[in-house]
């Protein structure tokens, strides 16, 4: 058994409806992430034919200080990006954004598919039955 992760769409940090990646193909994207393997995330965005014009890798578990938000804003301006996309893990940490920026930052959402779920379910049931 295993798992397959796939990016499915993006939702604005400010709220609102999710947007399929196909509807973002005409945008210049600056991607950023504070995860263990950010290049996988960046490559996944490119696999959806998005125009990623700049990327920023922050340390895993980044807290997104004022300085990091400033770095994101500067990278967007310098690269000509009109949107930024980050991970769900990072998106929940972006609460104190300057006015207007939260509409330009999207959170990429993942779909998780468990491969061989019957085998995994059987192992989990066996483990649960062994518990006192």
Image (cartoon, grey):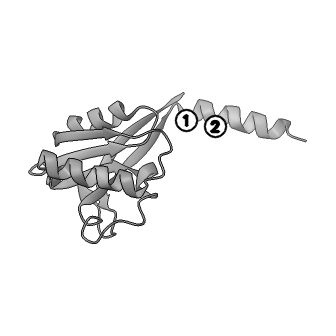
Q: Residue at x 29, y 36 (%)?
A: 42
Q: Name the side, left or right, on which 23 lies relative to 41.
A: left
Crowding near the residue tagged with mark 2, few <14, some 14–19, many ≥20 C-alpha atoms within 10 Å: few
SS at circle 2: helix
> Do residues under tags 2 and 1 come within 8 Å of each other at their CB atoms?
yes
Q: Can you tell which quarter of the image residue 19 is in?
A: bottom left
Number of marks drawn: 2
Residue 38 image point, x, y percent: 37, 35
Q: Which residue sits furthest right?
A: 132
Residue 122 image point, x, y percent: 67, 34
Q: Residue at x 18, y 47 (%)?
A: 29
Tag on residue 99?
none
- Residue that badge 2 annotates: 121
Crowding near the residue tagged with mark 1, few <14, some 14–19, many ≥20 C-alpha atoms within 10 Å: few
**Toward the viewer: 52 or 123?**
52
- Residue that badge 1 annotates: 117
Q: Look at the picture and state if 49 lies above or below 14.
A: above
Q: Name the side, left or right, on which 75 lies relative to 120.
A: left
Q: Name the side, left or right, on which 109 lies relative to 19.
A: right
Q: Using the rendered image of the protein, determine whether residue 48 is visible from the camera's viewpoint.
A: no
Q: Which residue sits furthest left?
A: 26
SS at circle 1: helix
Residue 34 image point, x, y percent: 42, 42
Q: Which residue sits furthest top?
A: 1
Q: Using the rendered image of the protein, determine whether residue 12 is visible from the camera's viewpoint.
A: yes
Q: Residue at x 21, y 36 (%)?
A: 46
Q: Look at the picture and state if 12 lies above or below 123.
A: below
The quadrant of the rendering that contains the C terminus is top right
The quadrant of the rendering that contains the N terminus is top right
Q: Name the side, left or right, on which 45 lies relative to 132.
A: left
Residue 79 image point, x, y percent: 14, 45
Measure how far apart labels 2 and 1 are at the Cα level.
6 Å
């Amino acid at each position: 058994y295993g798992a397959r992760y796939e990016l499915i769409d993006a939702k604005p940090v400010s709220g609102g409806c999710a947007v399929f990646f196909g509807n973002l193909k005409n945008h210049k994207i600056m991607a950023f992430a504070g995860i263990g393997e950010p290049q996988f995330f960046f490559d996944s965005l490119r696999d959806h034919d998005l125009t990623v014009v700049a990327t920023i890798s922050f340390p895993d578990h980044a807290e997104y200080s004022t300085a990091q938000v400033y770095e994101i804003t500067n990278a967007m301006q310098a690269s000509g990006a009109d949107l930024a996309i980050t991970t769900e893990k990072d998106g929940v940490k972006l609460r104190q954004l300057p006015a207007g920026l939260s509409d330009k930052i999207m959170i990429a959402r993942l779909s998780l598919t468990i491969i061989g779920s019957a085998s995994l379910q059987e192992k989990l049931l066996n483990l649960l039955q062994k518990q006192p």
